[in-house]
């Protein structure tokens, strides 16, 4: 039982890395403009993660001039009035088979007592781009 409790309260290596990344952002990236932070993080990505990040970045930044960007836990995040609205998380961040596009509680996506806050993404098709655009527009309304 002690081993089970210990493993459930311990952070994984990937979670520890995310915390170190957040601390690094606070030390190093905080001095950079938000757009430069995000461009540097995207430049570090490879393959499909990078392609998705570039496409999502262009898409979200084109939705409203009020949206700003900077990194958040080492990933591109999009802000409205200095609050995180949505973010992109590369699949490689946690060795996942897919990347995610998610929303924070500042997003105005409430739909009754149950609604999605994160979506798996493997390809930025026209249909996916339309869905993201619609959700981000709703989130910032």
Image (spheres, rainbow, N blue to C red):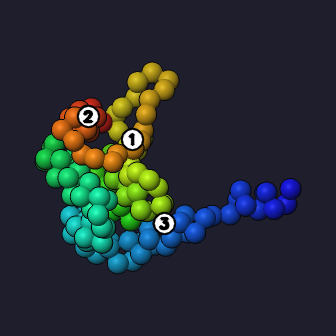
For the residues marked 2 and 3, what is the alpha-carbon distance in whole angstroms? Answer: 28 Å
Most foreground residue, 80 or 46 = 46
Is residue 100 at least partly visible in the picture? yes
- Image quadrant assignment for residue 111: top left
Nearest to the eye among marks 2 and 3: give it. Answer: 2
Of the two numbered discs 1 and 2 on the same chain, state the one appearing first in sequence: 1
Most foreground residue, 96 or 87 = 96
In the image: residue 123, left or right of residue 118: left
Q: Which residue is mark 1?
A: 119
Q: Are marks 1 and 2 in contact (CB under 8 Å)?
A: yes
In the image: residue 28, left or right of residue 10: left
Q: Find numbered disc 2 in the image and state the secondary structure of the residue it sits on.
A: helix
In the image: residue 10, left or right of residue 66: right
Q: Find numbered disc 3 in the image and state the secondary structure of the residue it sits on.
A: helix
Nearest to the eye among marks 1 and 3: give it. Answer: 1
Is residue 68 at least partly visible in the picture? no
Q: Which residue is mark 2?
A: 131
Residue 81: x and y in percent read 27, 48
Instruction: State the residue lying farthest toward the top.
Output: 112
The disc placed on residue 18 is 3
The disc placed on residue 50 is none
Q: Find numbered disc 1 in the image and state the secondary structure of the residue it sits on.
A: strand
């Amino acid at each position: 039982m002690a081993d089970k409790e210990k493993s459930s309260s311990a952070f994984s290596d990937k979670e520890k890395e995310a915390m170190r990344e957040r601390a690094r952002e606070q030390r190093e990236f905080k001095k950079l403009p938000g757009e430069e932070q995000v461009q540097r993080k995207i430049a570090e990505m490879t393959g499909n993660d990078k392609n998705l990040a570039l496409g999502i970045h262009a898409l979200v930044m084109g939705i409203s001039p009020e949206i700003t960007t900077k990194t958040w836990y080492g990933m591109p995040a999009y802000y409205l009035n200095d609050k995180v609205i949505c973010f992109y998380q590369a699949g490689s961040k946690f060795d996942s088979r897919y990347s995610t596009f998610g929303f924070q509680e500042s997003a105005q996506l409430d739909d009754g007592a149950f609604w999605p806050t994160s979506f798996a993404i493997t390809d930025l098709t026209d249909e996916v781009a339309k869905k993201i655009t619609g959700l981000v527009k709703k989130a910032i309304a």
